[in-house]
Image: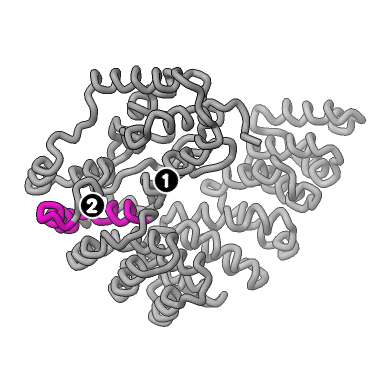
Amino acid sequence: ELLDHDDPHVRLWTVRLMCDDGQVSPELASKLTRLAESELNVETRSQIACSARRLPADQAVAIVERLLRRTEDVSDPHIPLLLWWAIEAHAESHRDSVLTMFDEDSLWEEPLVKQHILERLMRRYAQAGTRRDLVTCAQLLRLAPSKPDAELLLKGFETAYQGRSLANLPDELLAAMAEVGGGSLALRLRRGEVQAIDESLRLIADEKSPVADRVMYVGVFGDIREPRAVAPLLQLATTAQSVALRAAALTALQSYDSPEIGVALVRQLKNFPAEVREVALSTIASRPAWTKSLLTALESGDIPRDDVPLVIVRKMLLHSDRSIAASVGKQWGSVEGANTVQMQQDVERFTNIVNSVPGNPYTGKVLFGQHCGKCHTLFGQGGQIGPDLTSFKRDDLRRMVVNIVNPSLEIREGFENFVILTDDGRALNGFIADQDNQVVVLKSVDGQSQVIARDSIEEMRAIPRSVMPEGILKPLDEQQIRDLFAYLRAAQPLP
């Protein structure tokens, strides 16, 4: 009777309390299903979606199916995800019940299903990656009543398989993909289709193609390691007009174990624009043979030592190679970082500089963009490699100076620095931007992300050193330091 109460808050709390034990009688389950279809109050519908996750699969699926037809909730900030979580809770243990829900063609037409469920469901099974899960992907494709629906599923599948090989997919899934047209060019490229490889190579070389498309397919070539792509990728890395395209090509080349790549990149290093030079150096330092080519150029004087930042020097030392360590030691000596005494002296000096005379925050904003904004965001502007500084306690000058001078002293959760050594000899470092049971997405200080298959990782470990390099303030004169901190300490965005 309380489920029929005039007050929506009474109905809401009735739903919550009677479902908290995780089971209800068949009669109440039927009542909840009808309520899901007719409830006018959005908060009560939200509670029904939340409580459905706790119920047995057959009851949950019936309730969720009714809620998925509530078009008015497609833009609600909570209900779509609550419905997804209710489905996902039963996706493994009761997948047949979940799939049965999609037997009804009309459900596929619902905006909630198209916009919030199909891609997620396909991605969930594809990421799990067992044969049973991949066969379930095939079943979903065969249930799709239209090509646009199948394309949504394939988009979710493609997202799940970033950085992973499409070799050894079950015949059932390959057949289902073929029946719906084989998927996008990127998906066919991942499958290694010769025609898709040819078309993709033409696309990345075509200056009239959108840069975003070229960057995407360059990234796929980095994942699949197609030998024919090496020369085009080198060409893009060294001559492309777009900085984003050059950076993507450099990152993709890290996947190809060819000494010639390192030699070519070292030879062209002085010609790289400043915006991608660190990406080029990071690529060279990712493999021992390429690192040795760089060290040879440094020893001969072809490349000035000051052109190689300390973060790259440390990356070179990740390789377990005595000759590399010896050469680095010869060039740089100890690279363990500034000692505590030196850092304390720097903290005192920079604090005194900032406190001596007021700075200009407008000039400081420009300096922030040049020296900090690549990685950090302040007032909604900047990069997303490091933490957003807007909510940081920026009125505490000493703490801020300490964190800049010694960035490894206090590393925020989620920004820990990881080292990954792969079975093909690469040494990579950065923080983990994403991961699942199949891949790890590593984001490095140069802003580039790499998707690494877990089965290719020989070692992955956290290191107690921030990805943020030391010495950020050293190139600045005293007035520039005052200006930078005037902006960093601003309480609100500049007008």
The answer to which quarter of the image holds residue 256 is bottom left
Residue segment shown in magenta = 276-302
The quadrant in which the N terminus is found is top right
Q: Is residue 294 magenta?
A: yes
Q: Main secondary structure of the magenta part?
A: helix
Q: Where does residue 284 sit, x and y in percent of width and height?
A: 24, 56
Please say which color scheme the image uses. Answer: one colour
Q: Residues within 10 Å of mark 2 (few under 14, many from 20)?
A: many
Label 2 sits on residue: 285
Q: Is residue 144 left or right of residue 286?
A: right
Q: CA distance from mark 2 to mark 1?
A: 24 Å
Q: Which amino acid lies under the numbered mark 1 shown in the image of this protein? A: Gln
Secondary structure of the residue carrying numbered label 2: loop
Q: Nearer the viewer, residue 143 or 415?
A: 415
Q: Is residue 481 above or below residue 88?
A: above
Q: Is residue 59 above or below residue 491?
A: below
Q: Nearer the viewer, residue 188 or 388?
A: 388
Nearest-to-viewer mark from 2 and 1 = 2
Q: Which amino acid lies under the numbered mark 2 shown in the image of this protein? A: Ala
Identified at 61% across, 52% down, the residue is: 97
Label 1 sits on residue: 435
Q: Is residue 289 left or right of residue 344?
A: left
Pointer 2 or 1: first along the chain: 2
Q: Residues within 10 Å of mark 1 (few under 14, many from 20)?
A: some
Q: Is residue 127 left or right of residue 143?
A: left
